[in-house]
Amino acid sequence: MLRPLLFLTLLFLLVIYWSRPDNSGNKNTPPPSAPSPKKPPPAPSKPGRTVAVGDLHSDLPQTLAVLRLANVIDEDANWSGGQDTLVQTGDIVDRGPDTIAVYNLFDKLRNQAKEVGGKVVNVYGNHEVMNLGEDLRYVTEEDYESFGGREKRRQAWNVRTGWLGKMIFKNFNITHIQNGHTIFTHGPIWSRSNAMQDGGAEETCRRVNAAKKALGVNRLISGHTPQYRTGKILSICNGGYMVIDVGISKYYGGHLAVLEILENDDGTQNVFALYPGGKRRL
């Protein structure tokens, strides 16, 4: 009984073997595909532009004009800068009538920029600090009226309970370092008079170079000291220090200028001044 069963089993295996499709000569059968080579990871995208503007002093029309010059807002005053970073170096308030409008504009742009990968940075100016501390010597009557009177303005600036005081305390920075190479402050890191020395005075540049080395940056940027006589960005110490307060508000002459920093593939930067009449390398 065992032999017939063994014979039938062998016969069954032979039938299966001979009935297999013969692919050895089938030229239409594709050879086994080689594993696809791994694609290199995508190169990191180059950061967007960095643009910076100086003191605005409660002048909405001039603020809109300089931000359009920077190409970060459209005609409806909405963010159009994509992944760019906008830095404003303080002193939005005082000397003009449009305090509420300008602060609200930056708050709106901050939120809009964040949604598309951009960034809006505000740095404290001495006038922000003065108003938070109720030093109101430079507040205009039009400014008081826009808040509905002195008491309502005082309440709005309260850092714990006021809508504007809380907004500033939450969103403003004392300094800002951009991409590790440029530090933005409101005022110079030493006396204000140093910022007025054109041509790279020896003592000024010694201090600039010491500060750059200590901070590990390529350049220092500040506002605070209006260059209203020239209306141009001041660049000294071989571009190591720049003053971007050109007197944007009408109070200081209504000059328009934007600092623009472009990133290069080798880690260096190209720095330009943008003016209504054109672009100049710094």
Image: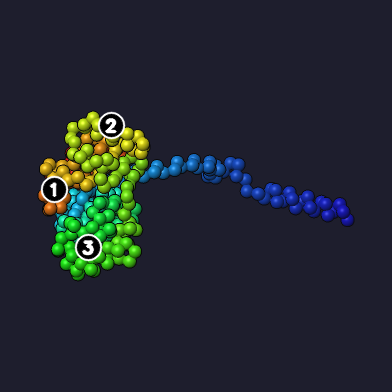
Residue kind at label 2, given as amino acid type:
Arg
The image position of residue 149, as x and y in percent, is 19, 69
Q: Is residue 226 visible?
A: yes
Q: Residue at x 13, y 45 (%)?
A: 228
Quarter of the image where one finds residue 229:
top left
85 w.r.t. 141: above or below: above
Q: Amino acid at mark 1?
A: His
Q: Going 72% across and 51% down the picture, which residue do you hit?
A: 15
Judge whether residue 27 can be spotted in this image. Answer: no
Marker disc for residue 100:
3
Image quarter of residue 26: top right
N-terminal of the pair, mark 2 or mark 3, is 3
Residue at 24 percent of width and 34 percent of height: 204
Label 1 environment density (alpha carbons within 10 Å; few <14, some 14–19, many ≥20): many
What's the residue at 20%, 67% (across, down)? Answer: 150
Q: CA distance from mark 2 to mark 1?
A: 30 Å
